[in-house]
Amino acid sequence: MRGRTRWRLAFAGAGIAALLAPASFGDAVAKDPTCFGAAARDPQHPCVDRTLEQTVRPTPAQARTLPNSPCRPLGDSRPPVCSFGAAAGPVVALVGDSHAGHWRGALEIVAQSKGWRGFSLTHSSCPLQKALRDLREPRRTHCRRWKRDVFAWFAAHPEVETVFVAGLTGGSGVVARPGRSRFETSVQGYADAWRTLPATVRTIVVIRDTPKMAGDTDTCVQRAVTAGRSPGSACAISRSRALDRDPAMVAAARLATPRVRTVDLTPFFCGSECYPVVGGALVLRDNTHMTGTFSTTLGPYLLRAVEAVMAR
């Protein structure tokens, strides 16, 4: 049933295990086949490798246990902060909920290439917006306190001039303001949060969120591989079903200020449909979160997009 909310964790059969090659987050992009992962959907340089059509790295069972990109904790900071990228250099920050965190694999590639030192400030189910999150206590209070600490942290760290933000799409996880829908409340919440960031944050880069998959996608992938079919195309989901409106992107468009810029890498996930496997890489580790493997393969293309928006 496609409405199930959790992926099954295991693939059955030794034959399937042989076809689904294992991988860890640490796989270097340079060691992968030329068309592995996001490279298979690069609109500027089309890349086709038929040998990857039945490859799935990592398997869905493996993916649920693999971490995001490594991040070095910075002691007992408040809010909790970890660092990535270069050891020194211009400072950037990645901030938001877990849907910001899953971009760190790609942003690690960007930071290393640009010589940036990155700080990661993320909190599950708590994007950086002023809208009140519709969470049960004590999670609601924890989220409110985290956001307060984040604003204070930025005020105390004027060296951070560029901030990358992302968050779960749909806008359903907030308490609606009087006379507004939840989505519109979320849009306003993002705009208000960005205005609250200190003037030392000169550039805010909004990364459009990733597609969502159905709850039985892993089973579909298993069956496709068993049948000798390409799991990416066999288990694809329509764009209208996989892509929700992104309130952060809407907020950025309405603000129409050069301080807030946007990056949309949807073409690497979707054509007329959105694909659970791209270039042999498993795209999501559950219904909504990217695998570290696919995130890392997006690094060169996030770099290209970031350089383009910075140039403007």
Image (cartoon, rainbow, N blue to C red):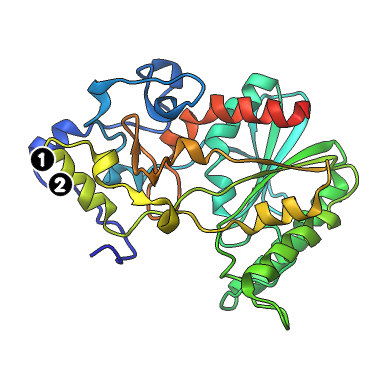
Residue drawn where x is 72% and y is 79% of the image: 177
| Image location of residue 171, percent across then percent down | 59, 66
Q: Which residue is mark 2?
A: 223
Q: Cβ–Cβ below 8 Å for labels 1 and 2?
A: yes
Quick check: can you spot residue 70? Answer: no
Judging depth in this view, the residue of 51 and 43 nearest the camera is 43
- As drawn, the residue found furthest toward the front would be 272
The image shows residue 234, relative to residue 86, as above or below, that is below
Q: Residue at x 29, y 66 (%)?
A: 4
- Can residue 233 be seen here? The reply is yes
The image quadrant of residue 148 is bottom right
Q: Amino acid at mark 2?
A: Arg
Closer-to-camera residue (1/103):
1
Residue 72: give x, y in percent of width and height.
Answer: 60, 36
Q: CA distance from mark 1 to mark 2?
A: 6 Å
What residue does disc 1 label? 227
Q: Secondary structure at mark 2?
A: helix
Q: Is residue 110 left or right of residue 27?
A: right
